[in-house]
Image: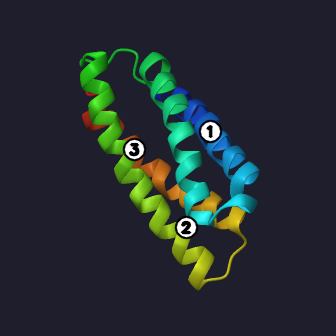
């Protein structure tokens, strides 16, 4: 496993735990889809900082360019996440945390590809 892959998994895992933790704290106070969005917003900052400093520290782009590109990448990942989450929650009837976990795993693969080959291009 390359160092970049290791750090991507570590940072992604930290961001996913942040996302799920926020979701778990607020889900009883709002719609699950809104709790998912709030978890995403907070985890975004964990994810960007970790990926910029660890996963893709040799990025050939400026911090500003990487932030803009990563925001687009993360929003695309969140769109996939929210769609899968809502389908699993509303149509398949899975428990919210299970649906969120599955959606996060799917979005992580998409985010890795977009991050590596575009947002933090080497």
Question: Would residue 3 be seen by someone viewing this image from the given angle?
Answer: no
Q: Label 2 to label 3, Cα distance in Å?
A: 16 Å
Q: Earlier in the sequence, mark 2 or mark 1?
A: 1
Q: Nearer the viewer, mark 3 or mark 1?
A: 3
Who is closer to the viewer here, 79 or 105?
Answer: 79
Query: Mark 3 falls on what kind of element?
Result: helix
Characterize the local packing of mark 3: few (<14), some (14-19) or many (20 or more) Cα atoms within 10 angstroms. Answer: many
Contact between marks 3 and 1 (CB within 8 A): the answer is no
Query: Where is residue 109 drawn, in percent x and y?
Result: 45, 50
Who is closer to the viewer here, 96 or 102?
Answer: 96
Residue farthest front in this picture: 29
Query: Where is residue 15 drawn, in percent x and y?
Result: 59, 37
Q: Quadrant of the C terminus?
A: top left
Characterize the local packing of mark 2: few (<14), some (14-19) or many (20 or more) Cα atoms within 10 angstroms. Answer: many
Query: Where is residue 36 drawn, in percent x and y?
Result: 58, 56
The residue at the point 73 percent across, 72 percent down is: 95
The circle on residue 2 is none
The residue at the point 68 percent across, 42 percent down is: 17
Q: Which scheme is used to colour this image of the protein?
A: rainbow
As drawn, 23 above or below 12: below
What number of labels is visible? 3
Residue holding disc 2: 85
The residue at the point 50 percent across, 58 percent down is: 106
Q: Nearer the viewer, mark 2 or mark 1?
A: 2
Q: Earlier in the sequence, mark 2 or mark 3?
A: 3
Residue holding disc 1: 13
Query: Mark 1 falls on what kind of element?
Result: helix
Question: Would residue 92 be seen by someone viewing this image from the given angle?
Answer: yes
Residue holding disc 3: 74
| Location of residue 83 (image quadrant) | bottom left
């Amino acid at each position: 496993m390359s160092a970049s892959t290791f750090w991507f998994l570590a940072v992604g895992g930290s961001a996913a735990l942040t996302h799920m933790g926020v979701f778990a704290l607020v889900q009883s106070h709002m719609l699950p889809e809104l709790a998912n969005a709030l978890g995403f917003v907070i985890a975004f900052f964990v994810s960007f900082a970790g990926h910029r400093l660890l996963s893709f520290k040799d990025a050939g782009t400026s911090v500003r360019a990487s932030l803009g590109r990563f925001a687009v990448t993360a929003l695309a990942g969140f769109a996939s996440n929210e769609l899968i989450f809502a389908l699993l929650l509303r149509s398949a009837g899975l428990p919210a945390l299970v649906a969120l976990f599955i959606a996060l795993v799917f979005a992580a693969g998409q985010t890795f590809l977009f991050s590596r080959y575009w947002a933090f291009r080497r």
